[in-house]
């Protein structure tokens, strides 16, 4: 079978509901007893050598004055190393890497075979100087305020501590509600010489900026540790959490070293009605795959050279967007005109950025350790891509039509089985949906038209 | 005639069962198949052919021209299978190169009649350090406890046969003790060291790499010391330099100390068992009928 990519691809968007989750790399602490609800979190990690830029976005939907987060960081962070980023950027990155649907349209079996391809995206829905007594009190508890500054709408404190009890007491006294169970984890980080990055919203600055949502925070630092701390986030979380990691490197695919990274199923042909419910279908598919691994795991959803995509769920990011995300080697690459360009991309587009999207579903029990990563030399492209194959729906009057219809029926049966297997949904339910939408050809439809005169005046 | 043949075949079978290398070849092949089918290793078949082919060919020529002895495919096959299991690469050239490096290291880097480096370990580290397109995936097995037990079982047979189970256990024991010590010091829950010990890569290393009888010290005390040393160096690389392949790097770093350990603790040098007293060619393995 041949396929042809339509030059003017129609891009539709399908809602892809994010699975709800409750935490982040750090953890949210309330300044008052308010229920906090945090959806899945997204982290973009740009890394080459020891240089790392992490951009953290969250779907925090509570009152901004209640927002606060504590993240262990490997070193003291200064004002220059922190940046408030554009929320649209992570949303774009998310859309670019999201699992996608591809549609093919069968040609008329009675005329030369031709398949058209239309790209349908399945993008995820976007929710997309301290006073002296404070310092004194901190000191008496063994807590050092290494730095304090305001960036964008956030007030940021960089803390180091001698022991967890003092840190916890100080944070609680300052109005951050730290869950008691977090002490053990805080102690572990303190002993590993980690510092703490504490961010809360500065309401005045937020009003000045006029932005409704909390923007992502980006932090640049240099460390041999290629990791994401998730342990604090599991302390007070109920149930599973979902974390999306977008790793941008110069090498190749990024994988976890202390957990197995596996690919999500891809390339399957699914019934065409999936187009209207792709978000739900993908969510079920992901849960089914995760359940096979005990409900949790690290799953690769996308790995691609960022100069291009095929099919594109969203446009590749511009140089400015990559720069904003912290891809610090862009200028360096452009200054080296002699660099060999990989096959299939134009010289101007080449920029030596490889993205890996990892979807981590975890809880405290199955993920006791923080996530540790490694950049491999594997530059294989991978994407979560699912195929919808539309049957030819015009008039067919030739002997080949019967055979074609039989094939279509077989194909639809297989698609039902595939979808049932991938999502854990009942086969009967899917089959009845197929019957309600495109249906199956009946035995009469498949009776070959043997009347020779029907072949003469086809249009009558 | 028939009785003679049956006897011959039973000798042959005993030989097959008694030589630890046959077990090792079988278990490594099983693990590769499990990796391919259950864990979707990135391992195209031509890489396996490239690596095994280059290792065997190099060994053939090395046996013929350097060692001047009959060609024996078993040891290089084990090295090639270990490489296949642990080395990930997108380039078949690197798979082939790794095979050649593995065998050459055995013939060129020697001390008092014993090769210094564990051949598969040497090839693995050199190729993954020198070429960005080759890497080690410590997370490729995940931490599935079931697989851990399977590896333990299979590994136990292999190393038990090779009489080098002491190295494997000493390595796992020391590494486990260090992980436990770290967790206690940090106040971490015990689920963390337990999770770290369930690493498939660690178990594969302990049972199928460091246990090679040809490159471990001759005396048991020496072997236990050596294993503890490798565990300590590996642990240090892992937790202070944050290199996830710490234990694999530790073996290549510690290997040059084996001659020294052998000087201090002398023991019987290991030789692969010989079960074919007559010339091997006298066995006709085809059925009589």
Image: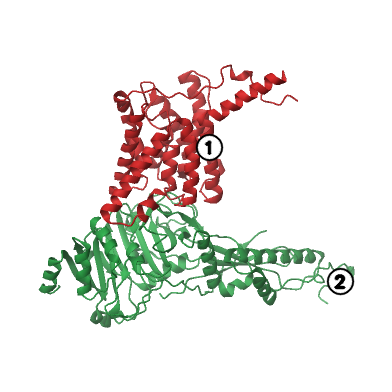
Q: Chain of mark 2?
A: A
Which numbered marker is on residue B50? Answer: 1
- Name which quarter of the figure residue A407 lies in: bottom right
Callout 2: few (<14), some (14-19), or many (20+) C-alpha neighbours within 10 Å?
few
Q: Residue at x 52, y 62 (%)?
A: A291
State how far apart marks 1 and 2 are (Cα). Answer: 60 Å
Tell me if I can see residue B146 in this picture.
yes
Which chain corresponds to the colour red? B
Along the horizontal axis of the image, is A129 left or right of B180? left
Q: Which color is chain A depicted in?
A: green
- Name which quarter of the figure residue B112 lies in: top left
**Tags 1 and 2 on a common chain:** no
Determine the secondary structure under disc 2: helix
Q: Chain of mark 1?
A: B
Q: Residue at x 10, y 73 (%)?
A: A132
Q: Which residue is mark 2?
A: A454
Tell me if I can see residue B133 in this picture.
no
């Amino acid at each position: 079978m041949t396929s042809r990519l339509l030059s003017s691809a129609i891009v539709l968007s399908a809602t892809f509901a994010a699975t709800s989750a409750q935490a982040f790399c750090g953890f949210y602490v309330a300044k008052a007893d308010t229920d906090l609800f945090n959806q899945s979190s997204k982290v973009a990690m740009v890394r080459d050598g020891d240089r790392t830029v992490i951009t953290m976005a969250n779907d925090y939907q509570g009152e901004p004055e209640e927002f606060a987060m504590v993240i262990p960081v490997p070193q003291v962070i200064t004002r220059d190393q922190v940046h408030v980023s554009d929320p649209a950027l992570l949303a774009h990155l998310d859309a670019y890497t999201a699992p996608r649907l591809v549609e093919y349209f069968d040609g008329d079996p009675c005329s030369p075979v031709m398949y058209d391809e239309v790209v349908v995206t399945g993008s995820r829905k976007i929710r997309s100087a301290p006073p002296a007594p404070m310092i004194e009190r901190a000191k008496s508890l063994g807590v050092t305020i290494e730095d304090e500054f305001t960036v964008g709408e956030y007030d940021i404190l960089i803390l180091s501590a001698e022991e967890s009890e003092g840190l916890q007491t100080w944070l609680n006294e300052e109005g951050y509600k730290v869950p008691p169970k977090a002490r053990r984890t805080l102690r572990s980080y303190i002993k590993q010489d980690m510092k703490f990055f504490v961010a809360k919203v500065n309401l005045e600055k937020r009003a000045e900026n006029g932005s409704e949502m909390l923007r992502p925070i980006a932090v640049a630092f240099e460390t041999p540790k290629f990791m994401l701390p998730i342990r604090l986030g599991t302390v007070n979380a109920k149930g599973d959490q979902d974390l999306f990691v977008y790793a941008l490197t110069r090498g190749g695919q990024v994988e976890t070293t202390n957990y197995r990274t596996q690919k999500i199923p891809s390339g399957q042909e699914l019934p065409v009605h999936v187009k209207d419910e792709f978000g739900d279908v993908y969510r079920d598919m992901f849960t089914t795959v995760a359940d096979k691994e005990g409900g949790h795991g690290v799953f690769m959803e996308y790995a691609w050279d960022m100069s291009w995509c095929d099919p594109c769920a969203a446009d590749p990011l511009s140089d400015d967007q990559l720069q904003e995300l912290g891809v610090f080697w862009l200028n360096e690459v452009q200054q080296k005109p002699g660099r060999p360009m990989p096959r299939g991309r134009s010289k101007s587009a080449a920029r030596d950025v490889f993205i890996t999207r990892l979807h981590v579903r975890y809880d405290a029990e199955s993920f006791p350790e923080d996530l540790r990563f490694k950049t491999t030399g594997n530059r294989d492209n991978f994407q979560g891509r699912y195929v919808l194959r539309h049957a030819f729906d015009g008039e067919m009057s030739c002997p080949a039509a019967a055979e074609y219809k039989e094939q279509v029926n077989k194909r639809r049966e297989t698609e039902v089985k595939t979808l049932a297997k991938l999502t854990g949904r009942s086969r009967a339910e899917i089959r009845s949906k197929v019957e309600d939408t495109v249906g199956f050809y009946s035995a009469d439809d498949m009776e070959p038209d043997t009347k020779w005169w029907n072949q003469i005046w086809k249009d009558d | 005639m028939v009785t003679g043949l049956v006897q011959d075949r039973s000798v042959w079978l005993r030989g097959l069962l008694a030589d630890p290398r046959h077990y090792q070849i079988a278990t490594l092949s099983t693990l590769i198949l499990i990796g391919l089918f259950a864990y979707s290793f990135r391992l195209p078949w031509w890489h396996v052919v490239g690596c095994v082919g280059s290792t065997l060919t190099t060994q053939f020529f090395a046996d013929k021209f350097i060692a001047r002895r009959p060609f024996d495919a078993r040891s290089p096959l084990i090295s090639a299978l270990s490489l296949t299991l642990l080395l990930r690469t997108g380039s078949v050239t690197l798979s082939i190169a790794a095979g050649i490096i593995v065998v050459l290291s055995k013939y060129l880097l020697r001390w008092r009649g014993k090769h210094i480096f564990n051949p598969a370990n040497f090839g693995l580290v050199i190729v993954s350090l020198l070429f960005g397109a080759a890497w080690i995936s410590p997370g490729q097995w995940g931490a599935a406890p079931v697989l851990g037990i399977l590896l333990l079982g299979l590994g136990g047979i292999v190393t038990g046969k090779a009489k080098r189970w002491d190295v494997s256990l000493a390595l796992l024991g020391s590494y486990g003790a260090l992980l436990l010590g770290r967790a206690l010091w940090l106040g971490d829950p015990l689920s963390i060291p337990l999770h770290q010990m369930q690493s498939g890569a660690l178990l594969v290393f302990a049972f199928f790499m460091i246990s090679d009888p040809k490159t471990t010290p001759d005396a048991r005390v020496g072997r236990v010391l050596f294993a503890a040393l490798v565990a300590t160096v590996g642990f240090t690389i892992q937790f202070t330099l944050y290199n996830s392949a710490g234990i694999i790097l530790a073996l290549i770093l510690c290997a040059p100390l084996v001659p020294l350990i052998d000087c201090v603790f002398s023991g019987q040098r290991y030789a692969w068992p010989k079960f074919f007293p007559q010339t091997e060619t006298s066995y006709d393995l085809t059925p009589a009928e």
